[in-house]
Amino acid sequence: MTALAMAEGTCIVSSESDSSGQHTGSEEGEGAQQAIDALSAAQREVLERCLHTLTHAKNDSHTLAALLLITRLCPAGQLDSATLRRIFEAVGLSLPARLLVTAVRGSDASGLPPEELLSLGTALLAALSTDPDMAAHPQLLTTIPLLLGLLADGPKWSLQKQAQHQARQGMEPDQPSQAEDGEQSSQSINTTKEPVQDTAGVKAPAQDAKSTTGSEEGTAENGAPTSHSTVKLDEALATDCYQVLITVCALPRGPDQLLARGAVPALCRALEQKQTLSHEKGLPLLGALLSGKTKERAWSKHPAELLSLLARVSQDFCRATGLTQLDMCALVPQFLPLPGGTPKDTDLTPTMVSLWVALRPMLQAKLTPDQLGPVLVLSACLLDLCGWEPVGPPKFCCLLVNRACVEVRMGLEEPPDTELSPQLQQTLTACYRVMEAAMEQACSSQGVTQQSDAQPQTAITGLSLQQSRQVLRVLEEAFSAVIYHLQQVDLSRYSDPFIFATFRSLCAWLAEETSCLKEEVTALLPFLMGYARSHLQGESQDQGLSNWMSEMSVGDCSQRGAWTGKDALRYLLPALCHLSAEDTPRKVLLTLDTPALLVTFLSQGWGDLRGKGGAALSRDPSMETACSALLNFAVTEPERVRKDPCFRSLESLLSFKPAPKAPVEAGQRRFFSAALRCLLRGALDSSSRPGPVRVTPALGGVVGGGWGAVEAGSAGPGRLCEGPALDHQPLVREEGWLNNHTLTMLGSCSALPDPHTHGALEEASAQWHSSAPFCRQEISVLVKSSAREPWVAWAI
């Protein structure tokens, strides 16, 4: 086949696409089928003959001729899947790969100029990639580094060989139009494969973008030229290259495939060198790579390139005006690193400050809801990343919180059957994040005074008392709307990610604020507990929510992991700790069987820790908070503790239940021995005798206001005498708690610290005096020996 015929074929083979790189047929499958159906009988016969010839082609010339005839009958963009599949089976992907390799090596064996080979090879790849199965084929994936190299650095074949080719064709050598005079650059392709004229199959080497695009002359560490101007790529060729990459990126594992083949540094280099279509197609492609699950790995693998990219995008955003800047609000978040995932020794503050400077006029302007949504989303992302420090003066911070709260009220205070659009849900989720960031300051004393350098950067510096009250007021109004919305949620929507975001936001509010909206919160407790219980007991049904949690990076940034059903309850635990300490909500929680849910959570958490060998985490704050809530129930509801079987399960869990062959009592015995030895013996300090006994500092804050707040009869030593599971009398003697510790202390000290401690010891003494002969004898001895101290006899 002549060079002219191949050049003509190149134009026809190229898939038809618009300026955005997408195929012009809006319904590609329907358009292809219509094109095939429109063929006459004679044309169909010719098409079949061409496909037969293609299948039985003996060399590349026959293959290319058949392809030319096929695309003349039906352009590549209009071929149906079945025809594309037959072409793929006949040609495979080795031909376009060999076309690319031959071009970048500058081989003369093909008899064609390199640009012709590149154009034809990329056009074939673009056409074949329209089928998802072909796009995921390993042979096509091996061409990705070559395509990335072309997009990043242009077609840098040897200009000397190009001139020699032109001389053989009887043409005057042209002046270099795509590189500076005298530049001698070629692709450093590490391959020994045969050129395109041979029939042997050749695969493109699976190398990264750096190894495939480096210049023979000086290059920087990232592979970019250091002393020569960039060679520009033909727009049609660039369109085909991006078409292949965009198609691959849309595959389930496509982002991983591109990331592993050097897509991020290559596309960043293309933007830096202002290569053809790099801004129109390369930037959106990078945004897609950095918006999903590959975001964290991309930042950890290519921090320098992505920091430079973020700075460039931020500069473009700050320089833009009007509607262009509003449109870019949806673009910038894609290029921000994850909170907590910023490279070490990196100061993002200047970039964040410049972004906030550009955002302030937008938040102060009158915008439509559709325009305001992306502005609030970007604001929330910046807050997650760097806190309040770079935001601006307190007045603007209050304005930001106010706008977020107003949007929440407007969005959620709708009739119960109103369906929220996905765009509105995204906006409201961003507003929740702004509100959560504001709560940490407005609900604490730190937020109303000048912040010191030692305080975290999340502080709103200089927030006055009046401004703090204003923020609290608008937050209260917004969370009233949140409660109203959650009251309308039924079981069928429990797996909705937006409902989880709303639930999580309310839990954050309840963890900080315990005095507002008490009646509304108490009325909502059945939903809150039902929602948490549903996720804890049905984790396998939450796959959609799990995917959303992963993509949104919800959770602890330092320990990201897969979503589990326990996460819903974890967010609610701080609120339960507060609510279980108040009479009215505690009664409601007991009717909802909350202690049993907490025990289940502890049991599962303890099983997870044991499964990890106990070395994964030094402590689990959520398990500690669950224990605090259970302690509130144990102290304030002793009758419920005696009767509720979940507390018997908790007792078995806390006593470190031994292996099944060992007696159950052995584990309980160890637990109560440790309690007598470490807790009760360490509760009171008589070192200051002959003065009054004191509560030790370590036990001073165990429950509520201190050790003395444990009501007599509700907890304390007397409770160790009850229960059928274990005879505690031998433990009292063996540990020496009564005679060697308590009775000795009473005989040597002048008074007990408070009436509560007195009551607890009085009950314990009465229990053991009535049930244990040896205890009765020891108590009688102390009473007789302390007759001169009436308070001792009265105490016991």
Image: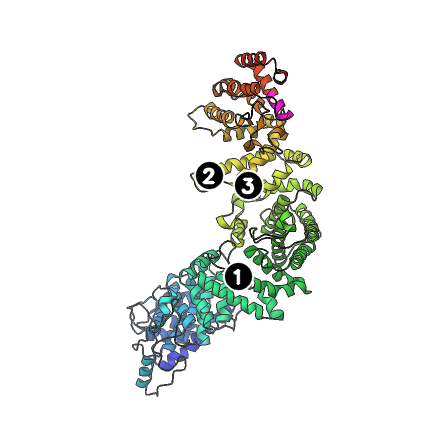
Give the CA separation, mark 2 to mark 3: 17 Å
Q: In the drawing, what numbered circle is on residue 609?
A: 2
Q: Please state which of residues 264 and 782 is positioned toward the viewer in this rendering.
A: 782
Instruction: Check disc 3 and give the amino acid type.
Output: Leu
The magenta span reads 750-761
Residue 354 image point, x, y percent: 57, 65
Apparent side of residue 588 relative to residue 150 in the rendered image (left or right): right
- Labels in figure, total: 3
Residue 32 visible from this viewpoint = no
Label 3: state its secondary structure: helix
Residue 649 image point, x, y percent: 53, 29
Q: Earlier in the sequence, mark 3 or mark 1?
A: 1
Residue 83 vs 753, above or below: the answer is: below
Q: In the drawing, what numbered circle is on residue 334?
A: 1
Q: Is residue 238 magenta?
A: no
Q: Earlier in the sequence, mark 2 or mark 3?
A: 3
Q: Which residue is mark 3?
A: 536
Q: In the drawing, what numbered circle is on residue 680?
A: none
